[in-house]
Amino acid sequence: MLEQLRTYMEKQNLDGFFVQNHENVRYISGYTSDDAYLLITRGRQFLITDPRYTEHAQAECPDYTILNWRGAAPNVGEYAAQLAEQEGLKAVGFEKDLLTVKFHEALCTAPHTEWIGTEGVIEEFRSVKTPEEIEKLKVACDIASRAFERIIRDIRVGVTEKELASRLSHYMVMEGSDTKPYGNILISGARTSLLHGIPSSKAVEYGDFVLMDYGCQYKGYLSDMTRTVVVGKASAKQREVYELEQKMVAACEEQMKAGNSGRMVYEASTAVIQDTEYFPYHYTGIGHGIGLFVHEIPFMGPKHETPFKVNQVITVEPGIYIPGWGGVRIEDQVLIQENGCVNLVSATKELIEL
Ligand SMILES: [Mn+2]
């Protein structure tokens, strides 16, 4: 991971790279806590943090020089500028999509260093997972699938969305996930048409769809899955929409293999509903890469042409959302292989009537 970055630096004639993105810091250094920055040079690696985290960083990153910026400079940017000057760095890459103007000004106080804006460099490395990362992602998906088996026993008339969302989080931690909270989407009834609805005090009613879009972290790696169930007997329309959704997901997953693109998957999903009254109710964002962060490259939708690579992990989540009536989403998380994909989410996709 560090080697990938050094190879990139060499190719781009950079003698330093400043890393600020939280997940990128973790990916490159293995540091799992907060408020840390990396300055990587051709031969050395520095982790800059403050006294709250120095001991933690020392233990997790033995190959790094751990530095405390507090007291030595008015802010991290000026500290990094001093360090770049001290190391004699001439051209240092930074993540231009993250830095504030103030931070950039602080970096630019280094008299002999040029700061070169880059975008998506480490994100690109992160998009293809190592066997160790895949293992952690599998465990995260497995924890979420086991939590699904538990939460469906709690769904009944009268229980609120908030209460169910909180229980779902609890089940995931009890099944072995990291404790870091993850915002569950757990919504019911007509509210299920809200793509990113927030759990409310609404109580579940007979005949409601309950849509659960959630996941957890395991050793930093994320799962993301969605299942939609019916409380009581599904109506004819609920069944019709659910069955179309199942077909959309299946059509998508058939396209999930190396060389195909997000656009191809999108087209496969819409082909299923093209000639139905539900076509206007689909959403174009139908999946995303996932790893240390929940939404990362590659993304899937009509404008995403980049071919998938072996060992990318991507969510598949087409959906049908009818305002005022409700929506159905099923989301899997799949591992891209040469000729197909492996679904890491084991929870059933059959219609569940509770
Ligand atoms: Mn998702």
Image (cartoon, rainbow, N blue to C red):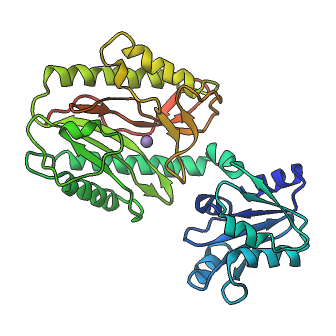
Report the quarter where the N terminus lies: bottom right
Percent position of residue 142, x then y = 39, 47
Residue 238 visible here: yes
Left or right, residue 146 beside residue 344: left
Report the quarter where the C terminus lies: top left
Percent position of residue 75, x then y = 68, 79
Find the residue positioned furthest to the top.
275
The quadrant of the picture showing ligand 1 is top left
Q: Nearer the viewer, residue 324 or 333?
A: 324
Percent position of residue 92, x then y = 83, 62
Left or right, residue 52 beside residue 205: right
Height in image: 77 above or below 22? below
Q: Nearer the viewer, residue 49 or 352?
A: 49
Height in image: 256 above or below 219? above
Which residue shows up at 60% across the image and 86% down it? 51
Which residue shows up at 44% across the image and 56% down it? 217
Which residue shows up at 26% across the image and 22% down it? 241
Percent position of residue 86, x then y = 87, 79
Residue 64 visible here: no
